[in-house]
Amino acid sequence: MHHITRRGFLGSTAGTLGILALNEAQNLAAAVQNEPASAAPPAKAKGLRIGMLTAPFGDEPLENVLEFAAKAGISCLEVVADPGSKHIDPVTFDAAKADSVKQMLAARKLEISGLACFGDACRPGGAEAFQNHARKMVDAAVLLGVPTLCMQTGMPLPNMTKINQIKQIVSKVYAPIIAYAKDKGIKIAIENWFETCLQGIDTFECLLETIKDDNFGLNYDPSHLVHQECNHLLPLRLFGKRIFHTHAKDTLIDAETRAHVGIYGRGWWRYVVPGSGAIHWGEYINHLRMSGYKGVLSIEHEDSAVGREEGFILAARHLAEFC
């Protein structure tokens, strides 16, 4: 792994997926191109269900993503809602577009679990633009009947600890967003991407103690804690009531390379689809249930060893064993 990027496919290390499993997924990915969407099972009304973050389909219209999800048996979508997004652009979104999206969802028995925009909330001079876009996301969520916005804190600032940044900067940037969202019944779920100021579990504690609003919580991704050697199960017990959304992504650890380059070196870990890394998903999902979570496991596909469609299908099939 020469350079860590956020929404691309990470790393160059070979995956651990067996040839047979990969071939099966490739065959299934090819098959869904010609399979009618009506063949997909209906979305679950309650309990844990499988979803997907639409980012890898960023160059395609939303309808194409919905068609793939329906054929692949993925019932929920965490839809990218950046400015200019081809999926949902809150800047230009209106009631007519919302009606069109809802019709496409209903025809395929799908739901949107969240609108996602992972912009930098702490970019110097960027707070007003960030807040304005977040308000437009709230408005779009209301039109669609979507309960949650999936967002991030922000990149670390120079000469400031992560704890102080959360207390002094993040809380102020998010205050008007949280208030606006609360008034309209929308929750804000923050992803714990390790490169932001939300890194170790101590920063989770700081964030949720500093911002106590009951509509502000986590879009919890356990994969980010694995390579930090934090307990990825502990947040489920500590913060279960404030986990509003989850990402399903795994982390592959190459212990031999780590022993050679050290923990500050590169190439000893990378993100993979669920079932291909260090997380025991049956154990994790059981803990998730015990915490009271009844939402979505949103597959975030950043695995460079498998293709786009194959990766989502492999992940969904593995998670379905426990959901």
Image: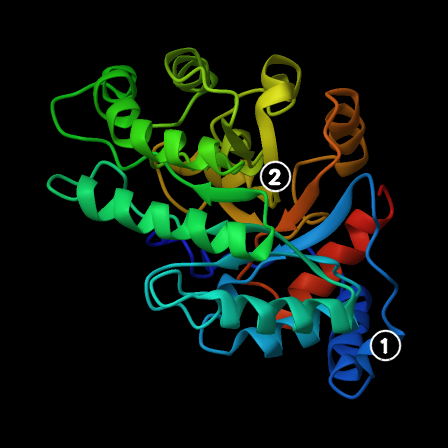
Q: Position of residue 157 (x, y in %)?
A: 18, 30
Give the answer, above or below, for where 313 lies relative to 50.
below
Foreground residue, 270 or 87?
A: 87
Question: Can you name the residue that lies furthest to the bottom here?
Answer: 34
- Mark 1 is surrounded, within 10 Å at the Cα level, by few (under 14), some (14 to 19) or many (20 or more) other residues, namely few
| Residue 259 x %, y % | 47, 32
Identified by mark 1, the residue type is Ser
**Residue at numbered disc 2:** 246
Q: Secondary structure at mark 2?
A: strand
**Count of residue discs:** 2
Position of 157 compared to 210: left or right?
left
Which image quadrant is residue 28 in?
bottom right
Q: In the image, which is nearer the foreground, mark 1 or mark 2?
A: 1
Residue 214 seen by the camera: yes
- Residue 173 percent across, percent down from the top left: 25, 31
Q: In the image, residue 132 lies at what x, y percent?
A: 27, 47
N-terminal of the pair, mark 1 or mark 2, is 1
Q: Residue at x 62, y 66 (%)?
A: 306
The residue lying toward the viewer, choosing from 143 and 277, is 143
Q: CA distance from mark 1 to mark 2?
A: 27 Å
- Location of the C terminus (image quadrant): top right
Identify the amino acid type marked 2: Thr
Residue name at image x 79 percent, y 51 percent:
318
- Would you say the residues marked 1 and 2 are in contact, meaning their CB atoms lie under 8 Å apart? no
Residue at the image position 74 percent from the left and 67 percent from the top: 106
Instruction: Find residue 38 and name its label.
Output: 1
What secondary structure is found at the residue carrying circle 1? helix
Q: Is residue 107 above or below residue 9?
A: below
Please name the residue shown 49% across and 62% down the image: 55
Name the quadrant containing residue 185.
Answer: top right
Most foreground residue, 50 or 139:
139
Residue 302 visible to an observer of this rendering: no
